[in-house]
Amino acid sequence: MPDLVERSIIQSHYETFTVCESIYANPNELTVDTDTRQIINALQEYFESTPTPDHEECLQNSTLGKSLIRSRALRLVIQQLIDDQPDLALRIAVELPLLQSEEEHQGGLVKLGIQSPDFLSRASSDRLVKELVLAMDDARANGLATAAEDNVGLIMDACQRVVTLGSELVQQEKHHQQQQARTLRGEKEVGTDNEEEELQRVWFWFPSLSTREKRRDLVTYASRWGLTGFVLAGKPGLLCLEGTAKHAESYMSAIKSESWSDIPSYQKKVTERYRQHIHARAFDGMSEITEMITQHGQRGNRGDMGEVKAFMEERGVGDAFGFVVVNGGVGGGGGGGGS
C-alpha cells in the first residue's frame, strides 16, 4: 500500500482548498467532484477532533487514510472568465497530491492543468499549457515554490497569468479571422497602412528590461495594431516598432496602462531614441531576440552589442544602431531621417 504524504502536507492541502473556496466564491467559479467533497468534509471533522498528530500511522491505516490513498489527490476546477464574458471561460484543473510515491521530491506542490477551451485553436491552447509550466518554473526560480504552504499563491498566480494570456490570444485570433474575411472579400484591412510613405520605424531604449511577462506583452500586444519589429531584453533593453505613428502610439499607451499597470509611474522608464520614415518593413512579425544574443555581465543580462549590431545590419536596419545604442540623445523624441 502506498504511503500518504505527511499529515502537515495533508493539512496544508485542506487549508489550500478552503482558501480557494473563499477566493473563487462566485457561482460556477470553483467546482469539486463528489469524492473530493466527501474527503474534505471528513478532513474537516478529523482536524477538528485531532488538532495535533498522535502517530502518523494512525491516519495512514484509518478509514479516512484509505480513502485518501484511493483518491490519490484532492481535485478541484477553477473557472475564470476572459474579459468577463461567460462564453470565454478558462477551466484550470488543480490537483493536491496525497501520496508520497508521487510527490517525494516536490514537497506536496500542486499540479496544474488546463482544459482546452473550444473558443481557442489547438496552438493557442498549447500556449496556455506552456504558460502554466512557465508559472511554476518562475516560482521555483524565485524560491516561491518549495512546499505545500506555497500552493495558494501558485494557484492564484497561475490563474491570473493564463487569463491574461488567454485574453491576448482571443484578440489575436479575432484579428486573424477578421483579416482572413477581408482578404476573401478583397478588402484592405481596416487600420493598416494606406500608403507606403506612412510607415515608420520607431526605436525605444530601456535602461533595464527583464520581467518575462512584460517582455511577452511587448511581443503579443503588437498584433493588435499590425506592428512588426523585435524586442531585446537585458541592460539595456531595446524595442523596434514598424507601423504607423498612430499605431505605435496606441501600442505604447496600452503597454503602459495595461501591461505596466502594476509599476509605479516613476519606474516606467522607456525612451524613444530614433524615428525613421520607411518605404517597407524589415520584419515580418514581432519577436523577442534575447536568446539569439550572447549575454555577459555578473548576472548574465547584458547583451553583446556587437552581436546586436550584426543582427540589425543583417536585417537591413544597421544604420539606426548609432542613434539607438551609441548616441542616446541623437534622433530622440520623434526626429530622425528616412531609410
Image: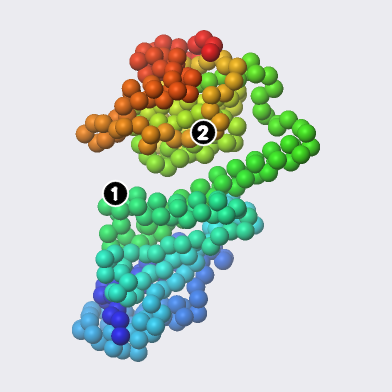
Q: Nearer the viewer, residue 159 or 19?
A: 159
> Of circles 2 and 1, which is in front?
2
Q: Which residue position holds label 2?
A: 286
Q: Which residue position holds label 1?
A: 142
Seen as rendered, the residue at the extreme front is: 314
Residue 207 position, x and y percent, is: 34, 26
Residue 14 position, x and y percent, is: 36, 72
Compared across the picture, whether 323 is left or right of 30 comes to left
Compared across the picture, whether 67 is left or right of 176 comes to left
Identify whether 203 is placed above or below 91.
Answer: above
Q: Is residue 272 visible?
A: no
Local SS, label 1: loop
Residue 112 position, x and y percent, is: 43, 62
- The amino acid marked with disc number 1 is Asn
- The amino acid marked with disc number 2 is Met
Q: Earlier in the sequence, mark 2 or mark 1?
A: 1
Count every numbered label the image shows and give the total: 2
Q: Residue at x 60, y 32 (%)?
A: 226
Residue 3 position, x and y percent, is: 28, 80
Local SS, label 2: strand
